[in-house]
Image: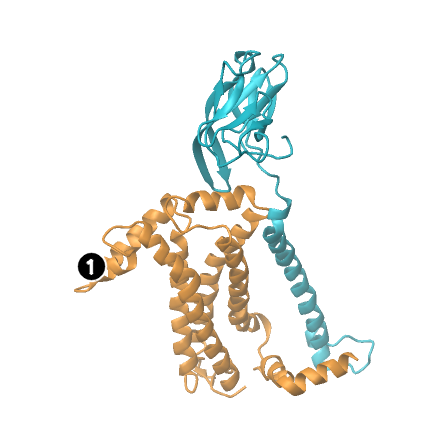
């Protein structure tokens, strides 16, 4: 190809000159390389938008250990995965059930200023010691400054184990 | 329409003349496999640009700290879309880069292309070679795995063998008496801030000199067997 075009420089417009051919080839291969690098690089860059969120279910024990009646405070260690950083945090939650099948899990912090509250067995209410917030057994505000009912955690049962997501979600409340 | 836009742009930037100087300049005629040797510089520059792109992407998920470096690199490979591919490009591109620049230097040396008036290009080129090796040395530590750690231990110990100033050089490299967190941040800063700045300046100079002097003729074999020529302006 190269030899021919040098010996008999074809001026016909039908014939592709060596120079034009190489220009086309450069653009073609350059585009292919740019496409591969560009598309993978862009995917890498925008991938956070498509990543599945970690659900972070925490096993807090056997579901049958939670008896119907009074809410129970459960302590657990939540492993939180933040990309390459894994943190463990001691935490707790109040769990109650009416029938041993449906469970309600409360964030252990008062919705007023985040104080830990306790269960008053006699009054059958949650009492917050800081500013005298009072919640009913279902988390509704009875009296005091709390602006909203107790926050709830998502909960599910898998193979008899109680799994919770210790992140307050207003939706569940 | 397109021509108008192009003219508008070229009149204000002189870009057409820059383009001509870079891509329409006269180059020596070389035939056969030898002509491929003249692509090594452009190839190095291309691989460098790939390193810039992949490196910028990797830096988005990398932490230069002993407690997170290894995990963040593993995170790139396992959890980021095309993370393994991008890291692979950067990893193999780094090796390929060193191979290319060394071949580029050998081509220049054996063709005598470093001679008058192109000594400046050669000197800048040697500096670029050292910077590329610097990139390789500093980048090798960043994954913070066993290989990275011990390779850098060996490298800094070699620096420590320098007469008189050895222990100082070694400590400056390591950011302290022992390898550790300061070593990693130091190597990272060199790898992503200092060396790229230096390499861009030197590359600009190198390219300018290449265009300014033109490319030397490949040497021809004389009747007596020795080489002649090599200094004709292209």
Residue B91 pos. (x, y %): 48, 53
Q: Image point 63% across, 18% down: which residue?
A: A102
Q: Which chain is cyan?
A: A
Residue annotated with mark 1: B167
Q: Quadrant of residue A95?
A: top right
Nearer to the camera, B165 or A12: B165
Mark 1 surroundings: few (<14), some (14-19) or many (≥20) residues within 10 A: some
B34 sits to left or right of B98: right
* Number of numbered markers: 1
Outermost residue, left side: B164
Q: Quadrant of residue B227?
A: bottom left
Q: Is residue B72 above or below residue B218?
A: above
Residue B33 pos. (x, y %): 57, 69
Q: Quadrant of residue A14?
A: bottom right
| Image quarter in which the C terminus of chain B is found | bottom right
Q: Is residue B30 above or below residue A112?
A: below
Q: Chain of mark 1?
A: B
Note whether residue A135 is visible: yes
B112 sits to left or right of B35: left
Q: Colour of chain B?
A: orange
Q: Image point 40% across, 57% down: which residue?
A: B188
Nearer to the camera, B3 or A53: A53
Q: Is residue B200 above or below residue A65?
A: below
Residue B19 pos. (x, y %): 62, 81
Q: Image point 49% across, 55% down: which residue?
A: B59
Q: Is residue B123 above or below residue A104?
A: below
Note whether residue B219 is visible: no
B163 sits to left or right of A58: left
B161 sits to left or right of A138: left
């Amino acid at each position: 190809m190269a030899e021919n075009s040098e010996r008999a420089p074809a001026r016909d417009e039908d014939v592709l000159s060596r120079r034009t051919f190489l220009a086309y080839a450069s653009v073609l291969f350059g585009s292919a390389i740019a496409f591969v690098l560009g598309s993978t690089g862009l995917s890498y860059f925008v991938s956070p938008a498509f990543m599945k969120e970690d659900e972070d279910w925490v096993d807090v024990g056997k579901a049958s250990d939670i008896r119907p009646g009074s809410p129970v405070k459960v302590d657990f260690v939540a492993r939180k995965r933040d990309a390459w950083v894994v943190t463990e945090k001691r935490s707790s939650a109040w769990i109650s059930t009416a029938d041993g099948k449906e469970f309600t899990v409360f964030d252990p912090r008062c919705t007023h200023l985040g104080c830990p509250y306790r269960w008053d067995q006699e009054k059958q209410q949650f009492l917050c010691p800081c500013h005298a917030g009072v919640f009913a057994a279902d988390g509704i505000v009875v009296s005091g400054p709390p602006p909203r009912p107790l926050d709830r955690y998502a909960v599910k049962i898998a193979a008899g184990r109680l799994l919770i997501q210790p992140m307050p979600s207003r939706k569940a409340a | 329409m397109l021509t108008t836009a192009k003219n508008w742009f070229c009149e204000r930037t002189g870009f057409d003349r820059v383009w001509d100087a870079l891509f329409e300049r006269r180059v020596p005629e070389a035939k056969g496999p030898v002509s491929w040797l003249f692509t090594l510089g452009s190839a190095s520059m291309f691989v460098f640009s790939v390193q810039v792109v992949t490196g910028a992407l990797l830096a988005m998920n990398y932490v230069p700290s002993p407690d997170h470096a290894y995990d963040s690199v593993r995170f790139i490979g396992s959890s980021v879309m095309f993370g393994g591919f991008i890291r692979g490009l950067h990893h193999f591109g780094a090796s390929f880069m060193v191979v290319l620049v060394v071949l580029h230097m050998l081509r220049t040396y054996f063709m005598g292309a470093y001679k008058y008036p192109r000594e400046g290009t050669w000197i800048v080129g040697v500096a670029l070679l050292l910077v590329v090796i610097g990139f390789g040395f500093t980048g090798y530590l960043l994954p913070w795995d066993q290989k990275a750690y011990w390779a850098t231990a060996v490298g800094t110990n070699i620096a420590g063998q320098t007469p008189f100033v050895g222990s100082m050089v070694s400590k400056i490299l390591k950011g302290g008496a022992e390898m550790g967190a300061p070593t990693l941040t130091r190597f990272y800063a060199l790898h992503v801030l200092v060396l790229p700045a230096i390499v861009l300046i030197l590359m600009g100079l190198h390219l300018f000199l290449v265009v300014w002097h033109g490319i030397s003729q490949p040497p021809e074999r004389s009747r007596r067997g020795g080489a002649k020529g090599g200094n004709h302006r292209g």
